Amino acid sequence: MYMGFNLSLEEDTDIWKAAGGYDKCVTVGENHLNEQKAAYETDLKCYVSEKELDGTKIQNEWFPQVQADIFISHSHDDKTLACALAGWLHQIFGLRCFIDANVWGYADELLREMNDRLSDKRRMDAEGYEIVYCHESCKKVSEHVNVMLSIALQKMIDKVEAVIVLNTERSVPVCDNYEMNKTYSPWIYSEIVCTEIVRRKPLSSYRDKNHVMLEHVSDETKTPISYTVSLAHLNPLTVDDLSKWMDLYHENWQDYVCALDALYESVCNEEHMLRKKLDEALRLLVNDNI
């Protein structure tokens, strides 16, 4: 990840007009994201090796890494809004977006497949009553699937150039102060913390590769468990900022290698220029020592 943003956005805004309206943005976003959707296996026999399941292969097949410029973190209740944002970004700037719910939206299917195979379905308990699933086995299977999805999400956040946290009343509803917020979604909590600790890669690591212009499984339950998160490390992003970005890029598109450069310049230019200087200094230092 090169840069992260904390975006406040709602359906009722004029930003969608430039891309044909909110409904069109949703459709464009869904079509764009569906192109990335992986064809997954439903027969776990292909993952069996000496009577055990190959967890690494299952993770790579069911939650594959895809090519994307922007990772959009959002609440399950904001799935349509996230699709609209993806459609707007793709239509206005040609950027590739990633939303796990659209690309990996079948973790429940994987959980069911693994429980069917591993959780002693239809066994008899000590009193002779039939049990659909063994609780302890289900718990372990759920742990495995959640870890697979979590690791895949962390890899995607590390892989993309930019991360946008879609900050609404559904995702980060409780605000204690300007620095700390709370979320009731363990997945949003995990993703925000990941953006805070993931390595910040130099911009050249993305541009040297011929740059071409989830919500999650069981995202939120009724159990009122909250997680304190800090959004201070993410650059604030508003609808006005999106408009300035769009105008700047359209007026000077020939000056930018990628549309994201116009975003960095218009929203966080000081940090962007500082990081570019540090990256250049590090590159020269490495070359001098070779």
Image: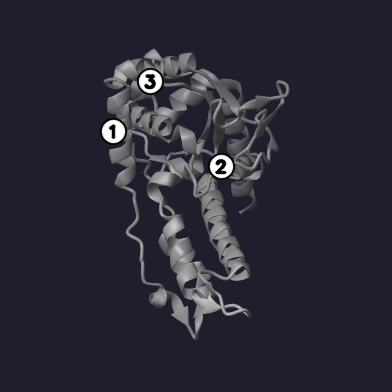
Q: Distance between the residues labelled 3 and 1?
A: 20 Å
**Callout 3: 10 Å neighbours few (<14), some, many (20+)?**
many
> Which of disc 2 and disc 3 is earlier in sequence?
2
Whole-angstrom CA distance, mark 3 to mark 2, is 37 Å
- Kindly indicate whether the residue at mark 1 contacts the one at mark 3 (C-beta within 8 angstroms): no
As drawn, is 13 to the left or to the right of 150? Answer: left
Residue type, numbered disc 2: Glu
In the image, residue 261 lies at what x, y percent? Answer: 45, 28
Res 57 visible: no
- Rendered image: mark on residue 220: 2
3D distance between C-alphas at marks 1 and 2: 26 Å
Mark whose residue sits in front, 1 or 2: 2
Q: Which quadrant would residue 202 be assigned to in this image?
A: top right
Amino acid beneath label 1: Val
Q: Is residue 23 above or below residue 50?
A: above
User: If you read the primary sequence from the N terminus, does the residue marked by circle 1 or circle 2 appear first?
Assistant: 1
Residues marked 1 and 2 touching at CB (< 8 Å): no
Residue lying at 41% horizontally and 54% vertically, measured from the top left: 106
Front disc: 3 or 2:
2
